[in-house]
């Protein structure tokens, strides 16, 4: 006997992304702010002054990608239970992409789901990680292999938070901006080449266009069944680099910068991208001090690690590559493994 169940599908969740000075925030439910000691020292006082709620708790977790684990998420959940938070409660992610990913994941599974708000404080989180509802943690097998698609209630992007950001962290965010431009918008890439991305008006325009592009993609493909996978340009290689180096040597955006260069080399070999355009992308990355070199000790081991990536399916590695020129993209799962290994071997010297 088969009894069909046809749940009424929920409408797509709509939420606002506000790019401006952080406004006063009023909540009629208990709120817990999840942050780390570095961000708390720099920004927590200011944020607390803008929040009004029935109860406000602050949960600090260790700082760094190496702490983006299920154990850290469990510690957040434990504190929620100890503080007697219920299903009406709200989490606020105050920090970079690591804080946002873990807070969103905790919100998605606490009592089967509570609301959360993103207040990103790094450029990488403002232009990419805070938008789109990807949440999760790393494992010894790879990056973000445990997680959920879970959209926030709102995202508050305040460019003033960037004034305290170390130059290296800022550059890591620029890598994600360049990624977006290379995949979707040649005019935006030209803008990035022609402007000082530390100047205030350029920063606001850079953030706004990046968020617009990300939102356009997520609106079409929330669960990454097609177009959204294009946002992983550079990431297939980057996730292997991060795993090989224990998530400690490179910031995420730095690994993505190297991964973009690797992807571009593969695209040149496939005849998809001209050498001049590959050099333009590399030069823009280098302008902001981003790494573009990585020593691949074992090309075969590096290649095999691709198969732990979420984008690999049916025993085929899916590569996200420029589609012929800057501003276009293609996805290929038919690349000769020997060609990939030869490209990887070039990074062994």
Image (cartoon, rainbow, N blue to C red):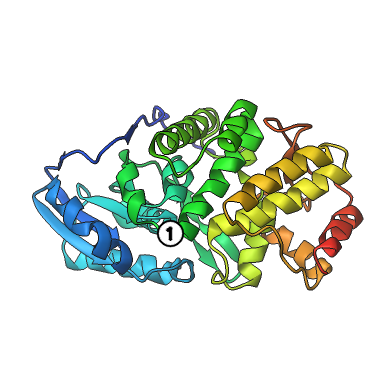
For the point 51% across and 28% down, the residue is 216
Q: Nearer the viewer, residue 134 or 231?
A: 231
Residue 331 appears in the rendering: yes
* Mark 1 surroundings within 10 Å by alpha-carbon count, few (fewer than 14), some (14 through 19), many (20 or more): many
Q: Quadrant of the N terminus?
A: top right
Residue 227, can we see it?
no
Pick whichever, 156 or 69, lies toward us: 156
For the residue pair 30 and 207, the one nearer the viewer reads as 207
The structure residue drawn at horizontal position 81% and vertical position 68%, both measured from the top left corner, is 348
State how many labels appear. 1
Q: Position of residue 322 (x, y in %)?
A: 73, 37
Position of residue 31 in the picture relative to residue 154 (left or right): left
| Residue 309, position as x, y percentages in the image | 66, 56
Residue 202 locus on image (x, y percent): 45, 35
Residue drawn 75% across the image and 69% down it: 295
Quick one: which residue is furthest to the left in this view?
54
The secondary structure type at the circle numbered 1 is: helix
Q: Is residue 126 left or right of residue 257?
A: left
| In-front residue for pair 15/298 | 298
- Using the image, determine if residue 84 lies above or below residue 319: below
Q: Is residue 38 above or below residue 174?
A: below
Quarter of image, res 15? top left
- Residue highlighted by disc 1: 98
Where is residue 89 shown, x and y percent of the image? 20, 50
Q: Is residue 82 left or right of residue 121?
A: left
């Amino acid at each position: 006997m088969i009894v069909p169940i046809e749940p009424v599908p929920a409408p797509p969740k709509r939420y606002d992304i506000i790019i401006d000075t952080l406004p006063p925030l009023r909540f009629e439910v208990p709120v817990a702010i999840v942050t780390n000691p570095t961000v708390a020292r720099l920004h927590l006082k200011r944020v607390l002054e803008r929040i009004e709620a029935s109860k406000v708790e602050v949960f600090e977790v260790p700082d760094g990608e190496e702490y983006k684990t299920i154990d850290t998420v469990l510690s957040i959940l434990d504190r929620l239970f100890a503080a007697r938070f219920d299903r009406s409660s709200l989490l606020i992610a105050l920090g970079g992409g690591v804080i946002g990913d873990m807070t969103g994941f905790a919100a998605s599974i606490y009592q089967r789901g509570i609301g959360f708000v993103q207040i990103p404080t790094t450029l990488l989180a403002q232009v990419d990680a805070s938008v789109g509802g990807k949440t999760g943690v790393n494992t010894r097998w790879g990056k973000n292999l445990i997680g959920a698609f879970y959209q926030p209630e709102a995202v508050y992007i305040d460019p003033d938070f960037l004034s305290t950001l170390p130059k290296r962290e800022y550059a890591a965010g620029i890598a994600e901006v360049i990624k977006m431009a290379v995949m979707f918008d040649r005019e935006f890439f030209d803008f990035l080449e022609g402007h000082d991305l530390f100047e205030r008006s350029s920063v606001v325009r850079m953030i706004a266009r990046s968020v617009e592009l990300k939102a356009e993609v997520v609106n079409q493909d929330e669960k990454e069944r097609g177009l959204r996978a294009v946002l992983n340009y550079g990431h297939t290689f980057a996730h292997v680099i991060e795993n090989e180096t224990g998530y400690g040597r490179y910031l995420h955006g730095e690994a993505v910068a190297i991964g973009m260069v690797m992807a571009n080399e593969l695209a040149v070999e496939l005849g998809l991208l001209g050498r001049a355009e590959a050099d333009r992308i590399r030069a823009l990355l280098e302008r902001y001090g981003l790494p573009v070199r990585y020593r691949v000790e074992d090309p075969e081991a590096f290649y095999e690690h691709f198969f732990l990536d979420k984008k690999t399916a049916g025993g085929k590695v899916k590569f996200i590559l420029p589609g012929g020129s800057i501003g276009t993209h293609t996805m290929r799962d038919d690349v000769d493994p020997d060609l990939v290994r030869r490209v990887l071997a070039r990074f062994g010297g």
